[in-house]
Image (spheres, rainbow, N blue to C red):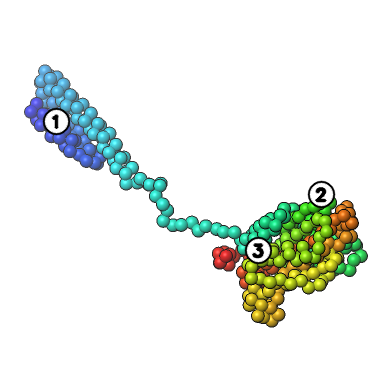
Amino acid sequence: MLQKLEEIRQDTLSRIEMAEEEAQLDEIYTLTLGKSGALTAILRGMASMSKQERAEFGKSANVVKQELETALSKKREALSFIMQERRFKTEAIDVTMPGKRKIPAGHLHPLTQVYRDIRNALVGMGFTTFDGPEIEHDVYNFTLLNLPLDHPARDMQDTFYINDEVVLRTHTSPCEARALINMKPPFRVAIPGRVFRVDEVDASHSPVFMQIEGLVVDKNITLGDLKGTVDAFIRAVFGSDVKTRMRPSYFPFTEPSAEVDMSCTICGGNGCRVCKGTGWIEIMGCGITNPHELENCGVDPNEWSAFAFGVGVDRVANLKYGISDIRLLYDNDARFLTQF
Ligand code: DAH
């Protein structure tokens, strides 16, 4: 019996030693220590032994049983550690590896690009930016700009009224008044912002669009200063080949007033559908600031003079990129925007 016990011991220990998976250990346990295991069978056989024999053999058998149980649980621990290491290795992720799928990078909206081009050109000529409210007093939007209540030119701009005295600004010009009232001449300001008109949406109209206004206040301003500035600014935005010309026009806040045309960016001045065969495209309004406006805003027209211009940023974007429908600028369809 002792010899049998020793055989089971050695055989089991060597099989535990060789086991490579936890399932094998379960099997070894069943075959040896389980209900119908080899060692269990031997322990049962002790019933037929004499009392003394049983005491001695029982001791050895218990030692073996404990030894095997300890060996099994030690091996179990070792195996689970190895399995864990193996899993760590196969599941490991190299977080420093470059991604396979690139996240598409966004870019500036064409309107923002054009706005920045215009702003940079003006800042390069010594302008600082000036900001004002979109919801504006009628006084700033009209009255101070030489458009008193009964002035027929108020009809030139279809106005959204909030109440009798407050409007959504129809142009960035009210900020001319705000700058004249708040800043000490001489100064040059560029005023960007959204403006609003009662207009049906179509290819060339939107009830919301963007303007940039320029205002220069100094002594002895001439039309030549205005023309030089407008010319430099348009060439900075559209390229140095572009030519400009001024045509007489009318704005209540300037005297004289002019409309600026530039040579057609599509046909280069030869005449096409966009310039209606003329070779010229109207791009902005401008003029020598009306002395009434200076006076209304507390600036002495005998001491100071000024010129101003206002340009539609959407219009510049359309001409620069050859976009024929203003709505595309506001729909924010990625298929359109990614082309710029
Ligand atoms: N405010 C005018 C408009 O929205 C544009 C404009 C014309 C602005 C002449 C000016 C200017 O400053 O001098 O149509």
Is the residue under label 1 in contact with that under label 3 (CB below 8 Å)? Answer: no
- Residue 268 relative to residue 338: left or right: right
Question: Residues under labels 2 and 3: Cα distance?
Answer: 28 Å
Q: Which residue is mark 3?
A: 236
Q: Nearer the viewer, residue 329 or 119?
A: 119
Q: Amino acid at mark 3?
A: Ala
C-alpha distance separating marks 1 and 2: 105 Å
For marks 3 and 1, give the CA distance.
95 Å
Instruction: Using the image, determine if residue 31 lies above or below residue 319.
Output: above
Work out which quarter of the rendered image holds the N terminus and state it: top left
Q: Judge the density around disc 3: few (<14), some (14-19), many (≥20) Cα neighbours within 10 Å.
A: some
Residue that badge 1 annotates: 9
Q: Regarding mark 2 in the picture, which secondary structure is present there?
A: loop
Element assignment for label 1: helix
The relative height of residue 242 versus residue 304 in the rendered view (above or below) is below
Q: Is residue 52 left or right of residue 120?
A: left
Percent position of residue 180, x then y: 82, 53
Secondary structure of residue under mark 3? helix
**Residue position for label 2:** 184
Q: Splitting the image into 4 quarters, where does residue 256 fall?
A: bottom right
> Which quarter of the rendered picture does the C terminus lie within?
bottom right
User: What is the three-letter code of the residue carrying label 2?
Assistant: Lys
